[in-house]
Amino acid sequence: EPEAPAAEATPARAPAPPPGHDDARVFASPLARRMAQQAGLDLARIAGSGPRGRVVKADIEQAMAEGTAKPEAAPPAAETGAEGAAEAPPRAEPAAAARPEPAPATAEAGFAVPSAPHEVMPLDNMRKTIAKRLAEAKREIPHFYVTVEVELDALLQLRAELNGRAAADYKLSVNDFVIKACAIALKRVPAANAIFGGDKIFRLTDIDVAVAVALEGGLITPVLRRVDGKGLATISSEMKDLASRARAGKLMPEEYQGGAFCISNMGMYGVRDFAAIINPPQSGILAVGAGEQRPVVKDGALAIATVMTTTLSVDHRVVDGALAAELIGHVKAILEDPMALLL
């Protein structure tokens, strides 16, 4: 930048750039630049008080209050003054009458501030963590999705028989069957039981399955360990215990960390289908919808079946399309032939 001429008086603050200076080259904070644009101020006419002459919010507010730093209008070719002079010299524009300026539309953090009446609800630590991790996951992990529909009538019949046993001290849910089916599928497709490690892939030897649990103001994913070796009654009991302690805030960190796979079931809310965001560093999550009666074609004839839509989200850096199709194909086959879960 050219230095100011020696004859110029030095202002108390850092010197303002000369009129006509390109706003894009003025050293100013992003907030100051937005405020100046909204207020119609010329940044080049504002002396910055920040480090190295940086124009900051306080400088814009002072310029707005003083009515200075408005862009100079070009004089017309033959302007007639109040006394009838043909070409009156440009006059200094008087200070604008004080009026309330609109609040900047954007906050310092870069998020929009609504102009409508609203309440401010500060984020607690859980919501901050959820916001940060899932934003990173959606931005950094190359998601892709595979969807299949599962017929549940055989599973529902088996579940009713097991829950109806006289000696039953358990109450199995459809989600318990889904957890077990995913564990068996991961055992059959071990390449999918893995997480991305930058320049390597970590293939896990234990089959641990996380399950999303809704909490007041957030969610958490407690992990069931070595699920492939456990029966449905044990899975049901452990899941109920983890969910209860999760809602009471009594889980230990090791109880909601680890694993390569997660299940998110929104069927109890009547959700037909959805696609879930992967919970890093895991590489897959199965979104489970509600089981509902739908028309299906069997042996060329129209029939009614209880159908559940499931969508698998996977990290393409770890799981390719064919591998994802194989994994969810096993989940579908196991759930449609649930007697295999008892073997």
Image (cartoon, rainbow, N blue to C red):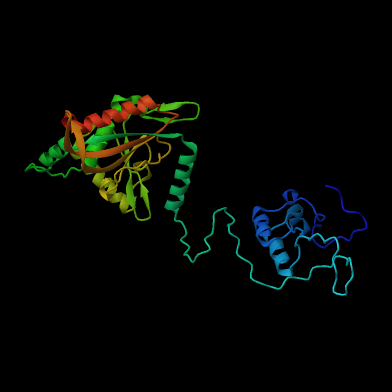
Residue that appears at 43% across and 30% down: 316
Relative side of 95 to 171, left or right? right
Q: Quadrant of residue 229?
A: top left
Q: Where is 2 relative to 311, above or below?
A: below
Residue extending farthest left: 166
Residue extending farthest right: 7
Relative side of 281 to 290, left or right? right
- Regarding residue 259, the answer to whether it shows in the image is no
Quadrant of the image containing the C terminus: top left
Residue nearest the viewer, comparing 319 with 225: 319
In this figure, what is the number of numbered marks?
0
Residue nearest the viewer, comparing 318 with 101: 101
Residue nearest the viewer, comparing 13 with 206: 13
- The location of residue 299, given as percent across then percent down, is 16, 28
Q: Where is 7 relative to 189, above or below?
A: below
- Regarding residue 73, the answer to whether it shows in the image is yes
Q: Quadrant of residue 194?
A: top left
Residue nearest the viewer, comparing 297 with 101: 297
- The location of residue 268, given as percent across then percent down, is 25, 48
Residue extending farthest bottom: 83
Residue that appears at 9% across and 43% down: 164
Q: Where is 320 relative to 44, above or below?
A: above
- The location of residue 113, given as percent across then percent down, is 54, 59
- The location of residue 276, given as percent across then percent down, is 37, 41
Q: Quadrant of residue 48?
A: bottom right
Residue that appears at 82% across and 47% down: 1
Relative side of 227 to 169, left or right? right
